[in-house]
Amino acid sequence: MDIVVSGIRSTGKLHLGNYFGAIRNFVRMQRENKCFFFIADYHSLTTHPKPDDLHGNIKQVLAEFLACGIDPEVATVFIQSDIPEVPELYLLLNMNAYVGELQRTTSFKEKVRKQPDNVNAGLLTYPVLMAADIIIHKATKVPVGKDQEQHLEMTRRFARRFNTMYGVNYFPEPDAYNFGEKLIKIPGLDGSGKMGKSDDNGIYLSDSPEEIRKKVMKAVTDAGPTVPNQKMSVPIKNLFTIMSVVSDPATVKYYKEKYATCEIRYGEMKKQLAEDIIKFVTPIRERIIQISSDTKYLAKVVAEGAEKARASASATLRDVKEIIGYRKWI
């Protein structure tokens, strides 16, 4: 049985991209592996150092996790900041992480470009904290998207460096989790890129039907095909990608045929897409509302999750400090 670790940042609500990109696979893998799923509230501070409602964001993501099918009776579900062993291991790993290699990471360069007025140390050492989150549970598998592959490779590097430096074979070098199928990358509604919180181009799992209709109807399109079987522009391809995961195959086929014969009406397609998204999201949204209102249940989930996660993390940290050379005096 593999030990699997993965987290979701607590910077706000989950969207369709999160669901199809990771969460539905978490639900599948939790019964076949020993899974640690956490809400990365420390990580979120690298881009949102002064969140408007940190606790509310954590509660929202936690409720959405559970509403999507993550089972706290099967997997360990916890909040990153409830595990003090993580920042301590992060500190120890930082002692053997080099500024040059951290500055060369693609994500750091991208964040420097996007937030030049907030290039903080947390951004630079983000891969080290991610590594601490993973190896503190001695994970063997990590589900990662394309944009996180470099971070996983750095996690492997830090684990290998620790083992080599201290002459041990303590940390496994975790591999990417293979879902056995190609991950679906859900594009945004703005005509380019992927669906994401920072770009404000997504459909959230907690969106009301009215919000969904409004967003979809504003989605970027083009002037329409002028010749049969014309190659689709990126915005139109994006709409069909979203439709392919929420609509019946017959619906997708119908609109592709209309596109191929230059008979498609984007307004009509958007209305259909909006209703299909609503049909898909509504059961999840209703569970989110129900779970969010049960504060006692949420408190129980995070308390039990923290207890299980700390048992794993404290054992690792104790071993690590002993390997480095720390000893108790009495």
Image (tube, helix red, strand yellow):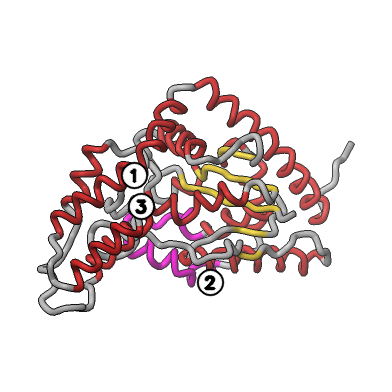
**From the viewer's perspective, is the residue at label 1 or at label 3 nearer?**
3
Nearest to viewer (mark 2 / mark 1): 1
Q: Residue at (51%, 57%) from the top-left corner?
A: 126
Q: Position of residue 171 (x, y in %)?
A: 75, 60
Is 110 contained in the magenta span?
yes
Res. 246 mark:
3
Q: Eyeballing the image, is 296 above or below 92?
A: above
Figure check: 161 above or below 132? below
* Left or right: 297, with 116 as reference point: right
Circle 3/circle 2 CB separation < 8 Å: no
Q: Which mark is residue 100?
A: 2
Span colored in magenta:
99-124
Residue in view at x 60 percent, y 64 percent: 178
* Label 2 CA crowd tier, 10 Å (few <14, some 14–19, many 20+): few
Magenta: predominant secondary structure element? helix
| Image spot of residue 278 (x, y percent) | 30, 42
Q: Which residue is drawn at 49% across and 40% down?
A: 65
